[in-house]
Image (cartoon, rainbow, N blue to C red):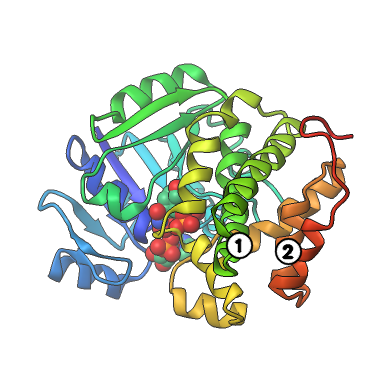
Amino acid sequence: MKMTVIGAGAWGTALAIAFSRQHEVTLWGRDAAQMVDMQANRLNRRYLPDCPLPDKLHLSADLSEAVMGVELVLVVTPIAGLRPTLKELARLKVDAPLLWACKGFEAGSSLLPHQVVAEEFPRLKTVGVLSGPSFAKEVALGLPAAVSLASENYGFARDFARELHSPLLRIYANDDLVGVEVGGAVKNVMAIATGVADGLGFGMNARAALITRGLAEITRLAVALGGSQQSMQGLSGVGDLILTCTGALSRNRQVGLKLAEGKSLADILTELGHVAEGVPTAREVLKMAERLEVDMPITAAVCELLYHQATPQSVVESLLGRTPKPEFGQA
Ligand SMILES: NC(=O)c1ccc[n+]([C@@H]2O[C@H](COP(=O)([O-])OP(=O)(O)OC[C@H]3O[C@@H](n4cnc5c(N)ncnc54)[C@H](O)[C@@H]3O)[C@@H](O)[C@H]2O)c1
Ligand SMILES: O=P(O)(O)OC[C@H](O)CO
């Protein structure tokens, strides 16, 4: 299959490397100088420095050339870049099947990625999300991983999951687009919270409690938005939540660890040099939760920390001081 990956950050580069083992792949990046550097060194020195690019992977900074005649477009920008990218693709009259791998809720509109896609490409029915527990570096190095490909058009999800599947990147079809997107978006908020707890030295019991209560929170929101509870037990639910809350490679977890050290958010993000989607998404998730009257105390605590100058200690104390409730149900 001839396909183009849009977005030459860590994840776009990793997916381009992985899919170029079986397919004819072009990786497009918006920064022409970076693409020249990648071509010269056959390495993404800025975003994925330890992972050489395969010889057969094409690189491009010319979007119209990159998408010409392709059978699949895979958008791997941060969620903030999804709508502008789609507008460009629409301007170029691209009508190829479309996948995206962005995780988050769009800032301002609080829309999930598939809702943004529906607004920009209302007639395209071969669309879906690729999401799951997958650190870019491990996928690029050819270590095994498994992700979901979800679409409301299950035939499309099944056919493209089969086409893209490989032993090293196993792809499972799913028809629960909402559940898969909510899981992928909100686990980043939980990873910030877990990073804070770990950074404060609260220990492994607290970490397990946060992950489990985080899953309860994610599940309540996913179900309120029309997602399925079953997906929360899958790759894009508990799978991605565990990976991101515990894995040292997680940028969102790193944000939490550094907040616990007392660093400012601005300094942390500058030092990180990558996107941490949990930061903008936390605010959108809380807005959505309030609108739908879904109880999301961990998300609220993360927002206090990120946006209202609360200290990590005070946020943890207020979470621990909450009135106990039944483990299941919203009583
Ligand atoms: N890195 C991972 O391990 C991983 C795994 C799964 C999913 N994701 C998701 O993939 C998305 C991209 O993450 P990443 O890790 O590649 O981020 P990154 O910070 O490594 O790189 C971001 C890339 O996006 C580009 N970009 C930013 N805004 C853009 C825009 N408006 N148009 C085009 N390009 C734009 C930047 O130039 C850069 O190349 C995020 O939503 C992330 O949650 C990442
Ligand atoms: O590094 P993070 O925290 O953005 O997480 C990367 C992936 O989403 C993990 O599946």
Q: Select label 2 or label 1 by which is in front.
A: 1
Q: Residue flagged by tag 1: what amino acid is it?
A: Phe
Q: Which residue is mark 2?
A: 316
Q: Quadrant of residue 329?
A: top right
Q: Nearer the viewer, residue 189 or 37?
A: 189
Mark 2–mark 1 Cα distance, whole angstroms, equals 10 Å
Q: Residues within 10 Å of mark 1 (few under 14, many from 20)?
A: few
Q: Is residue 58 above or below residue 239?
A: below
Q: Is mark 2 within 8 Å of ligand 2?
A: no
Residue 244, x across and y down, in percent = 48, 51
Q: Residue at x 13, y 52 (%)?
A: 54
Judge whether residue 111 can be spotted in this image. yes
x%, y% of residue 35?
26, 67
Task: Write the residue at 60% across / 65% down.
Answer: 196
Residue 76 in sight in this render: no
Does residue 62 appear left or right of residue 210 in this picture? left
- Judge from the rendering whether residue 239 lies leftward or rightward of residue 19; answer left or right: right
Q: Residues within 10 Å of mark 2 (few under 14, many from 20)?
A: some
Mark 1 Cβ and ligand 2 under 8 Å apart: no
Q: Quadrant of residue 214?
A: top right
Q: In the image as oriented, which residue stretches furthest toward the top? A: 155
Q: Are marks 2 and 1 in contact (CB under 8 Å)?
A: yes
* Residue at disc 2, secondary structure: helix
User: Relative to the observer, which residue lies in front, 8 or 36?
Assistant: 8
Left or right: where 265 falls relative to 13: right
Q: Which mark is on residue 202? A: 1
Percent across and percent down for residue 110 are 72, 51
Query: On the rendered image, what quadrant is the C terminus found in?
Result: top right
The residue at the point 28 percent across, 75 percent down is 33
Q: Amino acid at mark 2?
A: Val
Of marks 2 and 1, which one's residue comes earlier in the chain?
Answer: 1
